[in-house]
Image (cartoon, helix red, strand yellow):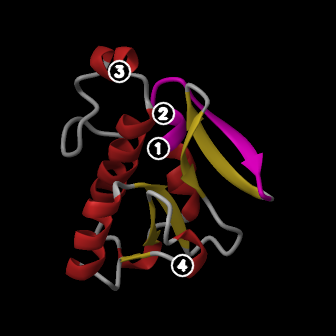
Amino acid sequence: MIEAEEIRRIALSLPETVEKEAWSMPTFRVAGKMYITMPDDQTSFAVRCPKHERTELIAAEPEKFWVPPHEASSAWVRVRLKALEDLDELRDILVDSWRQAAPDRLAERHPELRPGEGTAH
């Protein structure tokens, strides 16, 4: 199983990412915008995800993606660590969330940061 520490390692390797505690949990931000949260239990994490895509993800892989009731109106999805296939899949999910939060100027300077490209290991 992928460990929660891998989330931190990959997130902090992404440009201009900073870690900041909020709601008593680690969060990761780019240009002041949060794009990952890591709840205390360390069995899942949350990332940005447009609602229309989130619905499709949950329908396709409910064992991997979910949304707690109190987050139903947000544009975030939770991901179960134990359901991830490998570090490449984790990286793709984190990079996608980073790209949604990063300012256009920063994302444009890093075309290599697209899901499925490059390596973070």
Highlighted range, magenta: 11-23
Q: Earlier in the sequence, mark 3 or mark 2?
A: 2
Q: Which amino acid, mark 4?
A: Pro
Q: Residue furthest front?
A: 73
Image position, residue 73 (x, y; %): 50, 66
Q: Which mark is residue 68?
A: 4
Instruction: Tell me, yes or no, if residue 121 can be seen here.
Output: no
Residue at the spot 43% in from the left edge and 29% down from the top edge: 102
Q: Earlier in the sequence, mark 1 or mark 4?
A: 1
Type of the residue with mark 2:
Ser
Measure the C-alpha gap from mark 2 to mark 4.
28 Å
Of discs 1 and 4, which sits in the foreground?
4
Q: Is residue 9 above or below residue 108?
A: below
Label 1 vs 3, first from the N-terminus? 1
The local secondary structure at tag 4 comes to: loop
User: Dot 3: what SS?
Assistant: helix
* Residue under label 2: 13
The residue lying toward the viewer, choosing from 5 and 105, is 105
Residue 104, numbered label: 3
**Marks 1 and 3, how far apart in space?**
20 Å
Crowd around label 2: few <14 · some 14–19 · many ≥20 (10 Å): few
Residue at position x 44%, y 57% from top?
Answer: 75
Pair 1/3: label in front? 3
**Residue 100: x %, y % from top left:** 37, 39
